[in-house]
Structures are given as C-alpha cells and as structure tokens.
Image (cartoon, helix red, strand yellow):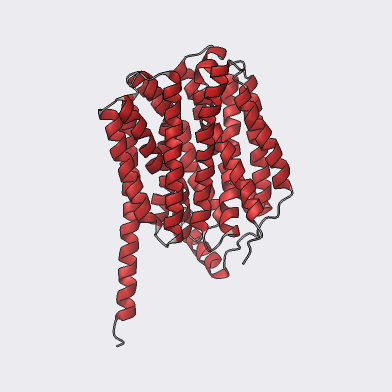
Amino acid sequence: MKNNYLSTAFGLYINYFVHGMALIIIALNIDVLASKWDTSIAGAAAVVSSFGIGKLIAVWLCGIISDKFGRKTSIILGILFYLAFAIGILWSPTASIAYFFGILAGIANSFLDTGSYPALMEAFPKKPGPANIIVKFFIQGGQFLLPIIIGFIMMQGFWYGWSFTLLIAVLTLNLIFISTRKFPPMDIPLPKIATEEKVHEKKGKFHYSIEEVCLISFGFVGLTLLTVLGQWIAKYGTEVVHMGENAGRMLVAYGSIGSLVCVVITFLLGNKGVKSPPIILTYTFMTALVSLVLWAFPSPMVASVGAFFLGFFSAGGLIQLGLTLLVEHSSRGKGLLTSLYTIAEGIAQFAIPLVLAVISNFDIAYIFLLNAFVALFGFALVFIVHIRDKRKKAHQDLQINAPAS
C-alpha cells in the first residue's frame, strides 16, 4: 500500500541534513571564527555549548506546541530559528553575540525534534524505528559533505561564509517545500492510557518508571558521544597525531562514512525484527573500546580507522534508537517524551562542550577517555532496561503457562 507521506518525510529528512552540518560548522570554521571574534580556540568552541541552553529553554514549549498545534507548526518554527542561527553566526562580530545565535540553534533543534520524530512515527506506524534511523543517515550525510565543501573553499581561497550561505539556501527552499506538504494525523492516547496517566498524577506528579528514567537519561549519552566525534576528532588529528589541517578535517568525513554504513545496517536489522536493546548495547560497548584505543595509541592510522569505527558505533543512530525505545516503554504523548529526551540532550549539549574545552587545555586525547566512560554509562542504562524487560517477559510467561487452580 502506498504511503501518502513520503514527500513529507523527505522534507523532514532534509532538515536533518542541514542540522548535521549545523552541528559541526562552527568546529570546522573554528580558526577563522576565533580570529574574527578575537578569542581563543577554546573560547570559540564554548559557543557550541549555547546549543544546549537553547534546547533547555525551549524544550517544554516545543513539546506543547507539537502536541497541541501540530507537528507542521513545530517544524516550520524550527526551520525559521535555524535560519536565524545561520545568518546570525555568519555576521556576529564577537563570541558573545555568536553565543546568542547559538542559543537560537538549540531552540531550532528542539522544535525540529519534537515535531519531526513524532511525525515520522505517525507517518510510518508499523516501522517507527527504521523511519527514525533514516534521520541519522541524513545527519551524517550533511556531516560527510560539509568537511569536503569547507576543504574546497579553503583550498580555493574563497570566503568562509559560503558554507553558511549553503545552509541558508537549503533551509529557505525546504521551508517552502514543507509548507506545502500534508502531515499525518496525530496519535491520540487511548482512554484507558489517559486514565492510567491521571492515576499516576494522583499518586505522584513526577512518577516515572525505571525504564523511562534510564531511557530519558540515554539522551545525554547519545548527544555526548555525537559531540565528541563531531567537535573534537579533527583537533585530535591535528594536535595529538600531528596531521595536516585538511587531513584532520577529513577525519570528520571518515566518521560520517562509518555512520552512514551503520545506519544502513541498523535499518536492515530493524526491518528484520532485531530489537533495539541488543543493538544499542553492542554499539555503546564498541564505542568505549574504540575510544580507549584512540586515547592509548595515537597515530595517523589509528586516527583514520578509529574515526570510521567511532562514527559507525557512536553516531550510527544511537540517539534515534534510544528515543524509539523510550516511546515503546511509555504511554505518554510522543511530543512530551521527545521533550524529556531533548532535555537530557540539552544538558549534554550545554555542559559537555565546556568540559571538553577545559580538558583540551591539558590533552585532547583525554577527551576520548571521557568518551569511553560515557559510552559505558549508556551501556549500563540500556542493560538495566533490557534485564527488566526479560524479567517481565519471564513473569508473563509463567502466568500464561501456570495451571488453572
């Protein structure tokens, strides 16, 4: 049966193609931006932390708008805020002003997430996991292409702002396209579920299951792993391994290739019915292992191969898999759940760049040691959910097979 929302989904995916570029565009232009803003590399890198502030400021409002006024409204607002970010960063004369526009990028991300993920799950109700995983494919597509574009711009001596202009052009065209698309009807919670939620509210306004707490917290882990790869792998190459600027920048592209390969494999596994927990457990464990190798054995070969595998395991859809798993373990509204998950991401997006900037003043290699510990923390969170699921299933099987008294 033909799906009527394929063109809508394509427009949503294009937004995340630009989002992937936006996540790393400051890092890849960090030298020229630091000079323009009259600050250090660490000072320019700290601007990235403003993304997290924007997420935290807007996340509750975004979830309400998505659930009350529709996914389309939320997504259009996200595009408009991203346009403001790209234009603002391009013309910011100081790091302080750039920080403000970085906050707008975080707000934009919140609007896109709370609108797009629920819309995709509603457009593809039988395959919500694979639909969300494709988001990661487009994010990494943007992160693969941008280093190549910026490398070309630098080699030709062109104005650095052309990379920002590209984002502005694509966002403007997609804004027009999205405005003409039809969106799926929003899911309405069943009366039984709504009644159960009211009972929970009476028992305790902030009652959440252990599974919900673990999976909401996983948003922090997923975003941290993504930040380390996107923001610091290039500097690891140039300052720790002593690669050239273009060679270091290409490490981001290698990570994106690894992520793209992983997205395809994860998509196929999801279509074959492989559950999310085993995939997430494998990916987080391997992320920790690769990060430890990068920390312990810095060399050009290790950096290149490590960037590919770090992209494969840590940026191949962990955030999307975690969100899909959260929705599967909760009866709350998709917009609300996405908001809660985004709060955890926002905390990471604000705090982690500041922590990593401090670590970079001592030794950038230690950033990947921290990455290993964060990945193991994510492994533990999902392992708890996995074990509890198995125990519940075993208990249900006992009840079903118990002889009638």
Q: Quadrant of the N terminus?
A: bottom right
**Residue 11 picture location, percent across and down:** 64, 46
**Residue 9 picture location, percent across and down:** 62, 51
* Residue closest to the eye, 402 or 313: 313
| Residue 371 position by quadrant | top left
**Residue 265 picture location, percent across and down:** 42, 51
* Residue closest to the eye, 49 or 195: 49
At 50% across and 28% down in the image, what residue appears? 48
In the depicted structure, whether residue 387 falls above or below residue 138: below
At 49% across and 25% down in the image, what residue appears? 27
Q: Is 321 on the left or on the right of 16, as rendered?
A: left
* Residue closest to the eye, 8 or 251: 251
**Residue 238 picture location, percent across and down:** 39, 20
Q: Is 198 on the left or on the right of 301, as rendered?
A: right
In this rendering, does residue 307 appear at all? Answer: yes
| Residue 403 position by quadrant | bottom left
* Residue closest to the eye, 247 or 101: 247
In this rendering, does residue 219 appear at all? Answer: no
In the depicted structure, whether residue 381 falls above or below residue 50: below
At 63% across and 61% down in the image, what residue appears? 3
Q: Quadrant of the C terminus?
A: bottom left
In the depicted structure, whether residue 300 falls above or below residue 62: above
